[in-house]
Image (cartoon, helix red, strand yellow):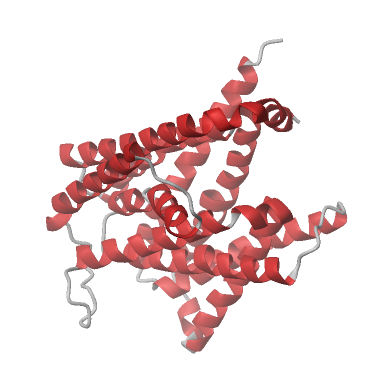
Amino acid sequence: MSTTPTNSSGFLLALGAAALFSIKAIFIKLAYRHGVDVETFILLRMALALPFYLAILMLLKRQQAWRPVSRRNLLLTAILGLCSYYLASFLDLQGLRYISANFERLIIYLYPTLVLLLGWCFLGKSISAPQLLCIFGAYAGILLIYWQDQNFSTGVLAPAWVNMDAISWGALLTFGSALSFSLYVAFSEGVIRQLGARQFTALAMLVASAAIALHFALQADWSRLQQPLPVYGYALTVAFVCTVVPSLMMSAAIQQIGSATTGAIGTSGPVITLIAAALVLGEPFSGYHFAGMAIIIGSLLLMKKVAGIKKRPEAKAEIAPASGTQSR
């Protein structure tokens, strides 16, 4: 029996997921043109996405697929949810006010290097010399784009209390977002294994939504929810088209073609962002940007390949069971 149709649909699903995830920054930038602030936009986005995750929890209950949650797992889920869906999102949207969409996407794309470093610092995992060289390569690519974007301006100045230019401040905020997401990735594996991906994600989203609502309420200015109609449209697009839909597409792609192939196709994300930012937002697209992007993506792909070669001898006995699980 030929598996070509399934593989073809899996590739298309993975590519579609990468594209939809990658254009999120474009819609956020378009919303900023209507004067919406970060706190309001992130609240609207979470409020529009929340019903979907509540539906997941209800479905798990109805299907009797709900797994008991210990106090430790509940606390860990809450902390990780705050790291990723609250802090990482907040810092990312703040950073986008100061830097280009393609620069933002490439900084976020550095998170695998941070996961590797966190594993080395806190989980006792080793880093090989080739992996270290790949990390240096990725950051060299970022520095190239940082240097090239020195003359780019979004028109938003860094706060008066910050002793750096707007590009540097935006890059620092976005790097903080990547670090927050890296904490989520590095420390979530165990609790996801115990609760399941859907239950964990839905619970983490509930915690993050509560934190975002509290953050907004403490500012006590509910009149900010009165926004121009396009802002609501962009918030809905980011919440559903760029978050919910691609997450489902990616899950389906992983089921059909595996996580490794899906991840490899996902490297097209920064390329899509770069092209979309140039066409829609008029942001710079030079040979230096393309070179920096190629260095970053190449370094991260090589780092992943090195990690795969390193693990392969230890995983030989697990190949058959893993394949069977994946095909179910």
Question: Residue 39, image x and y in percent?
Answer: 45, 74
What residue lies at 61% left-to-right and 26% top-to-bottom?
A: 316
Q: Quadrant of residue 35?
A: bottom left
Report the number of discs.
Answer: 0
- 217 over 242 or under it: above or below: below
- 5 over 116 or under it: above or below: above
Q: Nearer the viewer, residue 282 or 173?
A: 173
Q: Nearer the viewer, residue 295 or 213?
A: 295
Q: Is residue 142 left or right of residue 70?
A: left
Q: Is residue 188 left or right of residue 26?
A: right
On the rendered image, what quadrant is the C terminus found in? top right
Q: Quadrant of residue 254?
A: top right
Question: Residue 224, image x and y in percent?
Answer: 45, 80
Q: Which residue is the extreme one toward the left?
A: 151
Q: Is residue 33 visible?
A: no
What residue lies at 36% left-to-right and 58% top-to-bottom?
A: 30
Q: Is residue 249 left or right of residue 55?
A: left
Q: Is residue 224 left or right of residue 48?
A: left
What residue lies at 69% left-to-right and 51% top-to-bottom?
A: 193
Q: Is residue 194 visible?
A: yes
Q: Quadrant of residue 157?
A: bottom left
Q: Nearer the viewer, residue 253 or 234?
A: 253
